[in-house]
Amino acid sequence: MSIIPFDDRDGFIWLDGQLVPWREATTHFLTHSLHYGGLIFEGERAYNGKIFKSHEHSVRLHKSADLIYMNLDISTEDLCAAKYEVLKANNLENAYIRAAAWRGAEMMGIDIDGAKTHIAIAAWEWGSYFDPKIRETGISLKSTKWHKPSPDCAPVHAKTASLYNLSCIIKVEVKKSGYTDALMLDHEGFVAESTGANIFFGKGNKLTTPIADRFLNGITRQTIIELAKAEGIEVEERRIRPEEINDFDEVFLTGSAAEITAVGKIDDFIYQVGPLTKKLRDIYEKLVRGQ
Ligand code: PMP
C-alpha cells in the first residue's frame, strides 16, 4: 500500500497561530531542532469530533517543554482550541492529531539562547496504528539489544524527538526478523515498554505493568489503570524481570496511537488475546467514543 507523503497532502496545518495550506507548513534546513533533536510533540486522537484527553496532552506538551528548557508561549487552553480549529479546517471528526514545538533557525550550535519556539498542529485520518488484521491474534514483539536510557542519561519523561531515533532504529531491526515491534528493557534490565507504547501483562484477574518512573507514563496507561481498578481488576505496578514474562497469560500495549493492542507473541512465546485484554479494549473503545 503506498502512503501519500506527509508533506504533499491537501488541507490546513496550524503553524505559529495561523492555519496555512498543508504544503506550506515547512521549515528551513538550518532549524535548530532538526540537528539536535530538540522537538517535542504529542500524539492524540479525536473520536466523533471530541479529542480524547486533549487537556492532558496539552499539559504534557508543556511538561516536555519545561524538561528541555523550551519556552512554550501558548496556554494549554489555547493549544486545545487550536487542535479543534485544525479538525474543523480539515473537516475531520475521527483523526490522529500531531502537535509539536521546535527551536527555530536563529541559533546553530548547542547554545539555545535566542532560538525561537515554533508550534504546529496537523491532523489526519489514521486508522489502526498496527495492521487491524492482528486484532484477533495480537502483534509480535521481539527482544532487542538496545535498552531505554536511564533517567540520568536523557529526559525520559519528555516526549521529545531525540528519544525516538532509538525507537526508529529498533523498529528497522525487528521488522527484518519478521516482528511487529520490540520489547525494550530499561537501563537495569527490567521490562520497560515497546518502541512507542506502554505494556501490560495479565494473569487471572490481575494486571502487572512496569513502574513508569523511567519512561513515558502514557495517558492511555493511566486511563487503563483507572478503568481496570473500576472493574475490580487488581493492578500491580512493579519491576518485571524479562524471565518472568512467560508466566503471564496475556499481554497488551497501550498508547494514544496504538490504543489497546493485543500482543500475541514475544520472541518465541505465544499468548492468547485474553479476557482482560478484550474487556479493557472494549471499555476503552467505548470510553473514547463517549459511549
Ligand atoms: N511510550 C512511548 C515511548 C510512546 O511514544 C507513547 C506514545 N505517546 C507511549 C508510551 C504511550 O503514551 P500515551 O498513552 O500518552 O499516548
Image (tube, rainbow, N blue to C red):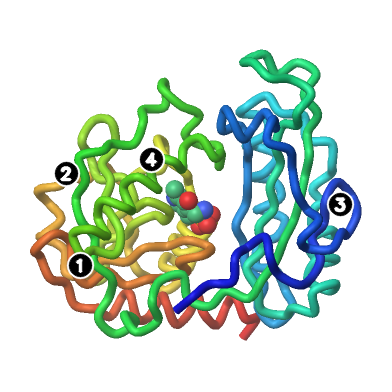
Q: Is residue 2 visible?
A: yes
Residue position for label 4: 166
Query: Which numbered disc flags the more N-terminal residue, 4 or 1?
Result: 4
Residue at disc 1, secondary structure: strand
User: From the image, which quarter does the C terminus lie in?
Assistant: bottom right
- Residue drawn at point x = 64 percent, y = 32 percent: 33
The residues tagged by marks 1 and 2 sit, at their Cα atoms, a distance apart of: 16 Å
Query: Which numbered disc flags the more N-terminal residue, 3 or 2?
Result: 3
Query: Which numbered disc flags the more N-terminal residue, 3 or 1?
Result: 3
User: Percent from the top left, x then y, of residue 67?
Assistant: 61, 28
Q: Which mark is residue 203?
A: 1
- Residue drawn at point x = 44 percent, y = 60 percent: 225
- Badge 3: residue crowd in 10 Å (few <14, some 14–19, many ≥20): few
The residues tagged by marks 3 and 1 sit, at their Cα atoms, a distance apart of: 43 Å
Numbered disc in front, either 3 or 1: 3
- Badge 4: residue crowd in 10 Å (few <14, some 14–19, many ≥20): some
- Badge 1 amino acid: Lys
- Badge 2: residue crowd in 10 Å (few <14, some 14–19, many ≥20): some
Q: Which mark is residue 50?
A: none
- Residue drawn at point x = 71 percent, y = 28 percent: 70
The residues tagged by marks 3 and 2 sit, at their Cα atoms, a distance apart of: 43 Å
Residue position for label 3: 78
Residue position for label 2: 241
Numbered disc in front, either 4 or 2: 4
